Structure formats: C-alpha cells, structure tokens
Image (cartoon, grey):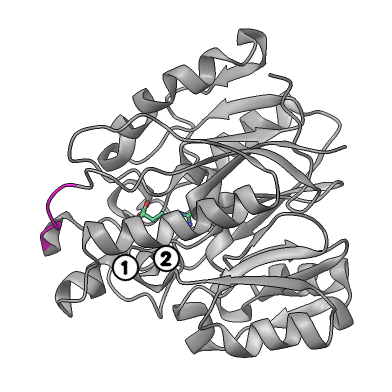
Amino acid sequence: MQLNITNETSLLQTVVIGQPYSIGKQPKLDEAYDAKSYQSIKDKIYPSESKIVNEMLCLEKILKKYGVEVLQPKILKEYNQVFARDVAFVIDDKIIISNMIADREEEQEAYEEIFKSINFKNIYNLPKKANVEGGDIVLTDEVVFCGVYKGSDFSQIKTARTNAYAIEYLKELYPNKIFKELQLKKNDKDPRKGVLHLDCTFMPIGKNKAILYKESFANEEDYHFLVDYFGIENIFELTENEVFYINSNVFSISPKVVISEEKFIRLNQFLENEWNFKVEKIPYYEISKMGGLLRCSTLPLIRKK
Ligand SMILES: NC(=[NH2+])NCCC[C@H](N)C(=O)O
C-alpha cells in the first residue's frame, strides 16, 4: 500500500476506522483518562456498546457510499478501540506509530495486519521520550500543526498527550515541512477548562477554511496565527458550548463533502448555506461522550494526490 496524506480534506481513498465491539466494562471514575469521559461517568450517561456500534455503523455506511475503502483493526477483548486516530498518523508516504498514553497502549497490537500491508521502510517508531497521539497532528499541504503541552507536570496530566520532544523528532523526519506548535489548555476533569487533542478544537475543511475555538489555546498568539493563516473570512469560530460537544471534530471525505454530527445545527447550516459544502449528517453523540468524535474515529491512509 502506498500511503499518501498531506492534508485533512483531499479525496479520501483508504481509511481505518476504530472498532466498536468488545468495548469492555464502563470505566470507573478514577479510570477515566479524559475529561469528557470523566464527566459522562460522573453524570451516569456513559454510552453502552450497542449505541457505540450503531453510530460507528452509520459512519462506515457513509464512507462506503462514497466508495472509500474501509479497514478496521482486529477486535481486542474488552478494550476501547473506537478512536483509531491516535494510534498512528500518516504524513506524506510515512506512517508514524504514536507513543500513546499507557491506558491506551494495547490498541496498537490490533493494527498489525494493517501495518503489514505497508512497506516497512515507511513505518516509523519514535524514541520512548517522544509522546505523541494522532489527534494532536493536523495537516495542511504547507504546515504540520501540532497540539502540545509543555508544562513540567506533563506526566501527571492524562489529557497531555504530545510533548515538545516528539515535535522536535518529527521535524527531523520532515525537514521540508513547516511545523507550527499550538499549546493547548489542559484539564483532566472539566472539559470546559481544557482540551484533549488539537482536533477537539481546530480542524481545516475545504480547500482553505477552518473551524476553531479561541479559548482552547494557551497562548492567544496561536489563535491569531491560525486566523491570519486562513483569513478571518475563512474561519468558523465555535462557542464554548459547541466545543464542549466537539463540533470541530468533523471528518472530510473531500474538499466538498464533510461528515458531521446531526445535532451540530449552527455549524451544519453554515457549512451548507454559506460555504456550499455537502454535509453528511450522522448520529455520533453517544461516542462524543467518550471525548472524541468523527475525526478521532478515523485514521486515513490514502487521499488522492
Ligand atoms: N483524536 C482524538 N481527539 N481522540 C479522542 C480520544 C478520546 C479517548 N477517550 C482518549 O482519552 O484518548
């Protein structure tokens, strides 16, 4: 398989989606490793496996309707494997295997068969000290945007997943790319006070547009950098409530077609009426209670050049 991913939106050809089966028991409050899951467990609304299965079947169906090849990891017994995005990520023709949070490490073994179909010369492992998950890596053709947490308490914060060392390492792998670090606010218990991954707060769509939420960035300059990069007229700014429901985490099949959650009313209408996107709306609310949405459930391998 010849990998090719240089941005978030070119015509999708092959994608891995997560696995909804054998999700295991509902985690206890002290087992949660992100703030949304923490809240859902606390509020007793954490989703059941059957609801997760239904939503992921809707995602699979839409992808297939557009002729996308859909792969899935093998099912591990009683292990949450919904969020394929974080396990690894493709930049250009290489796949980087993430160094994930320990609570999720086992997910990677389920990808063995998929990784076998990729030339081993294009598979990269990172040094142990380099922490990174795919949700923090967001691409445009020119720039690799990296969500990062730089506090000295990194190892104590479960929602801190990508460190500066990983980004330094990636820069050496891709000497011709521009890297832009975006420091994110973190909070393990309150999803309104921090953000898990960069894709939970920022996402390019179409050819030159983006969705984002200002307050997730620890440095206001990073927000201004994004606004200048895309141009203010090409930005859809989320409200606090919209980012809570992870409205940024839509998934593009092409520069014109976006898969979104059916309840993202203001966003969906704007995309359709103001920016002329085709928005495929599916139910994904139950999955969002575990801290991720559509982009988080996908790991694209090939987009058309
Ligand atoms: N790319 C993403 N935003 N993934 C969301 C992952 C959510 C998952 N509960 C975690 O904490 O790891």
Report the magenta stretch's main SS: loop
Location of residue 49 by image quarter: bottom left
* Residues shaded magenta: 24-28
Q: Is residue 39 magenta?
A: no
Could you say where residue 55 lies in the image, as x and y percent from the top left? 41, 62
Q: Amino acid at mark 2?
A: Lys
Are the two marked residues, 1 and 2, in contact with CB atoms closer than 8 angstroms?
Answer: no
For label 2, the SS is loop
Residue shown at the point (85%, 78%) measured from the top left? 276
Residue shown at the point (85%, 46%) measured from the top left? 141
104 in relation to 110, above or below: below
In the picture, the disc for residue 35 is: 1
Mark 1 residue crowding within 10 angstroms, few (<14) / some (14–19) / many (20+)? many
| Residue 27 visible to an observer of this rendering | yes
Image quadrant, ligand 1: bottom left
Residue shown at the point (31%, 40%) measured from the top left? 104
Residue shown at the point (71%, 54%) measured from the top left? 253
In this rendering, the count of numbered labels is 2
Task: Identify the image quadrant of the N terminus.
Answer: top right
| Residue 148 visible to an observer of this rendering | no
In the picture, the disc for residue 167 is: none
Answer with left or right where residue 76 lies relative to residue 19.
left
Q: Amino acid at mark 1?
A: Ala
Mark 1 vs mark 2, CA separation in Å: 9 Å
Q: Along the line of sight, which residue is nearer the eye, 19 or 121?
A: 19
The earlier-in-sequence mark between 1 and 2 is 1
Answer with left or right where residue 38 lies relative to residue 204.
left
Name the residue tied to disc 2: 186
Q: Along the line of sight, which residue is nearer the eye, 117 or 107?
A: 117
Q: Along the line of sight, which residue is nearer the eye, 44 or 200?
A: 44
254 in relation to 250, above or below: above
Indicate yes or no: mark 2 CB to ligand 1 under 8 Å.
no
